[in-house]
Image (tube, rainbow, N blue to C red):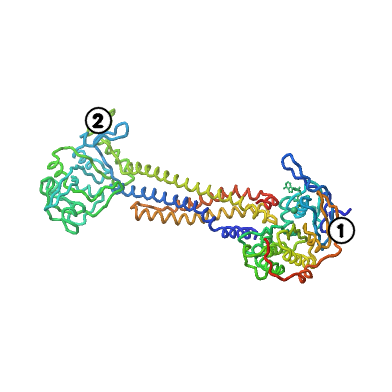
Amino acid sequence: MRVANLILVAFRSLARNKMRTFLTMLGIIIGVGSVIAMLAIGEGSRVNIQNSIASLGTNSIMIFPGAISHGGVRMEAGSVQSLTKEDAQAIAQQCDLISYVSPVVTKGAQVIASNQNWRTLCIGVYNDYFSIRGLNLSNGRLFSASEHRSAAKVCIIGLTVSNSLFGEGHDPVGEYMRINTIPFRIIGLMEKKGQNTFGQDQDDVIIAPFLTVQKRMLSTTNVNQILASSSTAAAMDDATDEIIQLIRSRHHLKDTDEDDFTVRTQADISNIFGSVSKVLTILLASIASIALLVGGIGIMNIMLVSVTERTREIGIRMAVGAKGRDVLIQFMIESIFISFLGGVLGIAFGVTASSMVARFGGWPVFITPFSVVLSFVFSTAVGLFFGWYPAQKAAGLNPIEALRYE
Amino acid sequence: MAGPGSDKLLRAKDLVKVYKAGEVEVRALRGITMEVEQGEFLAVTGSSGSGKSTFMNILGCLDIPTSGSYWIDGQDVSKLNRNQLAELRNRKLGFIFQSFNILPRTSALENVELPLLYNRTVNAKDRRQRAHDALIKVGLQDKITSMPNQLSGGQQQRVAIARALINNPRLILADEPTGNLDTRTSYEIMAVFQSLNDKGITIMMVTHEPDIAQFAKRKIVFRDGRITVDEKITNRKFAEEELKHMPALAVEETV
Ligand SMILES: Nc1ncnc2c1ncn2[C@@H]1O[C@H](COP(=O)(O)OP(=O)(O)O)[C@@H](O)[C@H]1O
Ligand SMILES: [Mg+2]
């Protein structure tokens, strides 16, 4: 009953000063809004990076030539030539936990078809590569065993390459083109994959049989990378160990020698980027929290000013029988209401801002319920915390002195 | 000597108030002893600075005396804490100020309701009803939803009177209620006071205008923190009568 009255009193007082109420709220609206938006952006980029990493292939394991130097930096792939096609074959035959494996060679390619010219990347792989990376064809077929054996001049192209050479909507399967002057027949077109987080166009690629690229275009026995995938996610660690043991023995490394190759799993990469994006999220969140804190101090400021400005009002209330506690509760309700409503509006503002960022900035955003609850609880706590001091001050006033205040 | 259980409405004994402003001490009240009975209409007069307001503020439980004791309706006020004083103000007293002291940007009705918002025994419906009735009692039936800035000084003071009345107080204390009003409006306020007093409400009113004091039934005079005169008013004036003989001009009120 009494608290209901005090709520009424507080609301009347807020309604009497709509402008002041709104301006006080603005700090909280902006604070909460930026917390929501920042967390949404941080979380969005995390999800996006995870998706990109997932597109490397589920349960995939990458083996690069060369060791990790002590700074954690791998020497450039081409500078050490330690992996061969036979290593990949051995993995396929001897590692039980590996379901797919393919060596990978890459070569920059100048492509010409009819009168169109295009610069792209040509990679040579076995068909397992498509399974590991989860690549599907929208048209045509994969390479046959005999095409692999004979280093046939056939290729499968990405959509960007197809569009650049033959124009949009034209089916390239069956067409011919020259890659670095060698004529190739196109036997397949890959489904569109789009850009990854790092801005690479995943459709700007040509895939040819491994031996075709290695023998005809590179004339080398080395490979840039071996890509494998384990049969299950649980077997990842054991599969990795299996590969390391196998390649070490194939390379005749003594126990004291360091690996002359590097094994990275999808999980490793995901962890690296995961921690990067976590740092990013924390950074964004702390900037936003500062905004919220400033909003809270804004509440305290206005409430303090309003205790001074409303000293006479407080005196009048006390003169007609308000107790210190009644005044305290009234002021607390006012500041909690301001921060509560500010929180609600701030959430709306944050959601709107994040979807603007998503739409116009092309940034991925992801609003987590957690961030909504967090900023809501936080803003109400800000109201409680920063409302307390001015409310306490108002409640401690002496009625006659408050009334005399000019 | 009557004890705390005295049937007097108000009893003050040796009230002393000393204000300390740094080194300087101001002895505003130097020992006030007096009694007020139920149904009295008392004018408190005296020159400026003689301690009238200090006395009223103490009786109104807005301030506390340096020493001495006083009883309101048999209750020893000097023994009460802050919250109990607030409760006493809320339930038994009505205070009217020279500067009206009504809340700005708040309708007449909401201003009048104010004391009942701090009284948990009155529900919202009764509160509205009583505020309505009080406004009618002071002649503001047409101004119920008006804001203070739409009201003249006299009307604002009537709002303040209605607010003082709403809790059916045992005692109304008014500190220069007509100090900011012109003569005709002052007389109208006196008419309200006299009619309230006729209904049995006890009123104590500070005024430095001798003609206003003539509307009361008893007069005390303050001088340097002491009561020097305490007498019955002989040729009492009646506001309704006086108003009849005044020009009924709609005089601009000075606020
Ligand atoms: N808050 C105060 N602090 C210091 N002195 C005060 C205060 N209030 C009143 N006084 C002094 O007390 C004396 C009595 O004041 P007051 O009760 O207001 O007189 P009155 O109402 O009769 O004019 C005056 O000398 C005044 O200056
Ligand atoms: Mg005075």
Q: What is the quadrant of residue B116 in the picture? A: bottom right
- The kind of residue tagged 1 is Glu
Q: Position of residue A396 (x, y in %)?
A: 66, 48
Q: Which mark is residue A253?
A: 2
Depth check, front residue: B228 or A80: B228
Q: In the drawing, does residue A212 fall left or right of residue B117?
A: left
**Residue identified by numbered label 1:** B231
Q: Position of residue A38 (x, y in %)?
A: 41, 49
Depth check, front residue: A180 or A359: A359
Q: In the drawing, does residue A174 fall left or right of residue B88?
A: left
Measured in 3D between alpha carbons, the distance from the residue under mark 2 to the one under mark 1, in whole angstroms, is 121 Å
> Is A85 drawn above or below residue B34 in the view shown?
above
Residue drawn at (39%, 52%) of the image: A366
The quarter of the image holding the C terminus of chain B is bottom right
Q: What is the quadrant of residue B21 in the picture? A: top right
* Chain name for mark 2: A
Q: Is residue B45 visible?
A: yes
* Chain name for mark 1: B
Q: Secondary structure at mark 1?
A: strand
- The kind of residue tagged 2 is Leu
Depth check, front residue: A405 or B38: A405
Q: Secondary structure at mark 2?
A: loop
